Image (tube, rainbow, N blue to C red):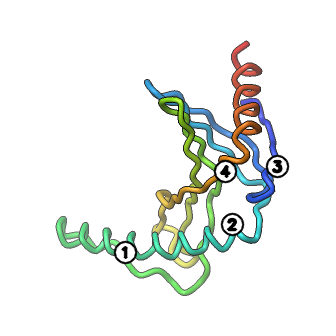
Amino acid sequence: MIKTTMEIRDCGTLEVSDIIFDTDSIRVFMDFLDISSELISNVAEAIEKSKIEYSKNMKEYNREFGRNHPINWSNAPVVICFCGLLVTLKNHSINYSINVGYEDAKNPFMENFDCEFDIDLSKYEPEIKKTILKILIDKFF
């Protein structure tokens, strides 16, 4: 895969790591090489909310299927497995979201790779479009 980096002042430095083509959309995932302090606090808040949701869903799953998967997160900070920007292009519109995957520091079997929140990067849209076009041209032409 061709790696392309870009700097977004409000977020940090990103490196494109994956492009996904669906039937009616393109999704581009960019890993953070470094991340702004403001965004770090937003990520931490999203993780705390998703930990609660995870525990609630897992408790319901355990009850429904007679399982005993752990539902309580340790007090230790989570281990972040990935954190990046997902850019989705669909129907001539662009959506930006931060995606985070993490696991419990004490129990790595407790993991959540579905933590996501939207972010407004519309002021960087021309830069992001140019980066995506460059990647597509470099990869396929």
Numbered badge on residue 7: 3
Which residue is situated farthest in the bottom direction here?
75
Is disc 1 placed on a helix, strand or loop?
Answer: helix
- Look at discs 1 and 3 and give the one toward the viewer: 3
Q: What residue sits right under mark 2 in the picture?
A: 39
Between the residue at mark 3 and the residue at mark 2, the CA separation in whole angstroms equals 14 Å
Amino acid marked by disc 3: Glu
Q: Between disc 4 and disc 2, whose residue precedes?
A: 2
Cα distance in 3D space between marks 2 and 1: 24 Å
Q: Is residue 78 left or right of residue 39?
A: left
> Dot 4, how many residues are within 10 Å of its Cα: few (below 14), some (14-19), or many (20+)?
some
Residue 121 tag number: 4
Question: What residue is drawn where x is 38% and y is 71%?
Answer: 53
Q: Earlier in the sequence, mark 3 or mark 2?
A: 3
Q: Mark 1 is on which residue type?
A: Ser
Residue at 56% in and 65% down: 102
